[in-house]
Amino acid sequence: MARAIGRATSTVQSWKDRQSIPDEHKPHVLQVALAHGYCVTPSDFFPSLQTSEDAA
């Protein structure tokens, strides 16, 4: 994934370790993940997009 988004492996590993992708990188990471066939949705990256039904 690091290569696909053009970031250093250590950078992506640090995001994984802290369980958080910096907000400014989320749109690009989401776009690349979808292009590579990962099963993700915008709400995986932007939790505030969840509806009240999704949160229940």
Image (cartoon, rainbow, N blue to C red):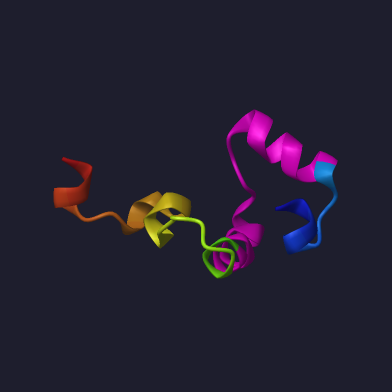
| Position of residue 45 in the picture relative to residue 17 (left or right) | left
Which secondary structure dominates the residues rendered in magenta?
helix
At x 22%, y 43%, the residue is: 55
| Position of residue 52 in the picture relative to residue 37 (left or right) | left
**Percent position (x, y) of residue 31?**
57, 69
Please identify the quarter of the rendering in which residue 3 is found: bottom right
**Percent position (x, y) of residue 5?**
73, 62
At x 15%, y 40%, the residue is: 56
In the image, residue 18 sits, relative to residue 49, either above or below, namely above
Q: How many marks?
A: 0
Residue 6 sits inside the magenta stretch: no
The span shown in magenta is: 10-32
Determine the residue located farthest toward the front in the rendered image: 37
At x 62%, y 60%, the residue is: 29
In the image, residue 10 sits, relative to residue 43, either above or below, namely above
**Percent position (x, y) of residue 48?**
35, 53
Please identify the quarter of the rendering in which residue 20 is found: top right
Please identify the quarter of the rendering in which residue 39 is found: bottom left
**Percent position (x, y) of residue 7?**
81, 55
At x 59%, y 64%, the residue is: 36
Residue 11 sits inside the magenta stretch: yes
